[in-house]
Amino acid sequence: MTGQGRKGAWRLIPGCLIVRVNEALKAGPALPPRVQACPGSLGHPPSHEPAAKKTSMAATGEPVRIWAQFARRLLPALALASLSLQAQAQAQARVQLLPGGFVYLHDIDPSIMQDMRYASSNNFIGRPLAGYLAAECVVKREVGSRLKAIQRELLTRRLSLKMFDCYRPTRAVADMVRWSRDRRETPRDRRFSPAFQKQDLFRLGYIASHSRHSTGAALDLTLVDLTADNSAAFDSSATYADCTASAQARAPEGSIDMGTGYDCTDPKGHTAARSITPEQRRWRTELVAAMKRQGFVNYSKEWWHFSLPGAGGPAYDFPITPRQIDAQDRP
């Protein structure tokens, strides 16, 4: 950023303000914090100027006074611009890059809620899956940017996204496949899959040996009403009804009632299921529409599952590790 005055010029770079003015400017207000004049700038014209011009400048009080007043008025605006540029650069630096261009969604938009089920025991396997070392949503940067745009729109209506699963290491996919083939049925299995045997889930398309989650193109999520009481928490020692039961009887999720719980492998979990109420159908339609406006496509057998065409690539297997906590994130 540059400008011209009658007897000098200024140039702005982040954290460094260069102003060619007379020594009289030093009597003005101090520069704002973190914005300092570069060495040799204030009151020290460049050495290439003729000595006669320096003498003339020092002897001419009125031009100096006018320029000094102008510079004093300009400095605060320049300082704010410099600080803004620094803040943008620092925010960009805080986005932690992961293998394959993945990022932590929290670094893109911390307002998006996260309930990362596969990093906990609240899932159909009953334990954290292989590769989930932290409850963090990891996404491709483009996916994160589109989720941020969706969230911005939803917040105007006192709604929010809540993420259940994002990037999924291929070792976690293999973990699911092994579970589906062990032929052991438990009450927890029936809670998530009341209509099917676990060995049928692979054949029916609920579990696959390759997942778009591993490429960064797929997401599992829902909507939250920010005006509602979402305080009910999952209790691993409690007994809950299966995922097709009423919201009051099944495991709490702290989100809008979509007719089934998350990961409910049942025909009622199909996006266009007819066995749900008009209100539940309205919310499913609302979710699909919000995601569609940013290019996401819903999987018809799972109302919670969306993918972004063209966003994927090769499958990855790096583990999901804790995000580095920035000083601004600490209480």
Image: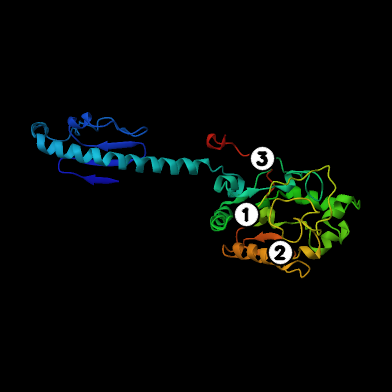
Q: Which residue is more in the foreground, 254 or 167? A: 254
Give the number of callouts. Answer: 3
Left or right: 132 as drawn, with respect to 37: right
Which residue: 62% across, 54% down?
161
Q: Say few, some or many: other residues with alpha carbon within 10 Å of mark 1 (under 14 / 14 to 19 / 20 or more).
A: many
Q: Going by the image, does 104 lie left or right of 252?
A: left
Residue 165 appears anywhere in the view: no
Q: Where is residue 261 in the image (x, y as percent from the top left)?
A: 76, 56
Which picture quadrant has residue 9?
A: top left
Q: Given the image, on which type of amino acid does mark 1 rest?
A: Leu
Q: Residue at x 48, y 42 (%)?
A: 91
Mark 2 vs mark 3, CA separation in Å: 35 Å
Residue linked to disc 3: 321
Task: Give neighbour class at mark 2: few <14, some 14-19, many 20+ (Cα, 10 Å).
Answer: some
Instruction: Report helix, strand or loop for mark 2.
Output: helix
Q: Distance between the residues labelled 3 and 1?
A: 22 Å
- The kind of residue on which mark 2 rests is Gln
Q: On the rendered image, what quadrant is the C terminus found in?
A: top right
Residue contact at pointers 3 and 1, CB within 8 angstroms: no
Pick whichever of labels 1 and 2 is earlier in the sequence. Answer: 1
Residue 37's label in the rendered image is none
* Disc number placed over residue 280 in the picture, else none: 2
Estimate the spatial distance between the alpha carbons at disc 1 and disc 2, rounded to whole Å.
16 Å
Please name the residue that numbered disc 1 is placed on: 161
Q: Is mark 3 on a helix, strand or loop?
A: loop
